[in-house]
Amino acid sequence: MKLKQHSYFHKGMRIPKPENLELNREKLVISSLPWGHRDNIASYIQKLADFFVAAKDDAEATSPFPRYPQYSNNLNNLQIAMQVVNDNLFKQKNQEELQSGLEIIACYRENNEFGWVSYGGPDILLWKNSGELRLLHHANNLASHRKQNCSPLPKNMLGVYRSIHPHIESIQLEDGDKLFLLYSSRLNPFHIESFQSNDRSLASLVNQLFEKDPKESFWIAELESIA
C-alpha cells in the first residue's frame, strides 16, 4: 500500500505534521502524529516496522508480549511491535519527564483482509462502491466534540504510560472499496458519514471537508493498493 496525501492547515489551528512510513513489499503503512519533541521520533516508527518484518519472517521468534489466539499472525505481530515501541519510548523519553507522545496506526492489506492496530489517531474512513461513506475507526480526539475553536487534544499516545492496550481490528474488503486516513483538528467524524458524492476520489473528500468547515485543519490520505 501507499499513501496519496493532502493537507490543509488553517491559521491558528495547530495540528502536528504526520510522520509516515510505507513498506510496499509487506503492504504495510504506518502513520503517526508526534506530539512534543520530535527528535529521533522517526526511529521509533522504523523500529515498529522492523519488528513486524522480523517477526513475519521468523514465525518461531520469541515475543516479550503475549499473543492472542483470536487475532491473525499479522495483527499479533503489529500489536506486539507497538507495545515494544511504547516501552522503548516511555523508558528513553518520558520516564523522568514527559517529552514526546505518538498517536499511531499500523495497517496492512493481505488479499481482501485489511487489518490495523492503533493507539490514538488517525480515523479510518471506508468509502463503499455503493457510495456509502463509513467511519470505520474513530480515534476519539478529545477536542472533536467542542463547539469553540481549539486545537486537537489527543486521548491516547504511545510513550506516556508504561503499558497500553492498543485497538486491534480487521475487516474483509469488497471490490471497489476505498480506504482513507484522516487527522482533523476539531471535526466531529460522525458528521462525515453524511457526505455524498458520485466521485469517490481524494479530491472530492477534501472539498467536502473544506466546505463542512473552512476553519478546520486536517491531513487526509488515501490508502492505495499496490499489486
Image (tube, rainbow, N blue to C red):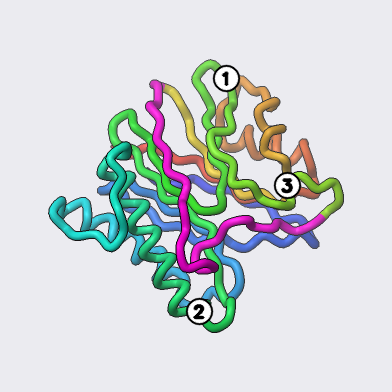
Horizontally, residue 146 falls left or right of residue 132, namely right
**Which portion, as a residue range, is magenta?**
150-175
Instruction: Give the labeled residue for mark 2.
Output: 95
At label 2, the amino acid type is: Gln
Of the numbered discs in the image, which one, if any, rests on residue 71?
none
Residue 217: in sight, yes or no?
no
Q: Is residue 43 above or below residue 118?
A: below
At label 1, the amino acid type is: Gly
Q: Quadrant of the C terminus?
A: top left
Horizontally, residue 150 falls left or right of residue 100, namely right
Mark 3 and mark 2: span between their CA atoms? Answer: 29 Å
Pick the front one: 162 or 59: 162
Instruction: Give the labeled residue for mark 3.
Output: 144
Mark 2 and mark 1: span between their CA atoms? Answer: 47 Å
At label 3, the amino acid type is: Ser
Residue occupying image coordinates x 83% and y 53%: 149
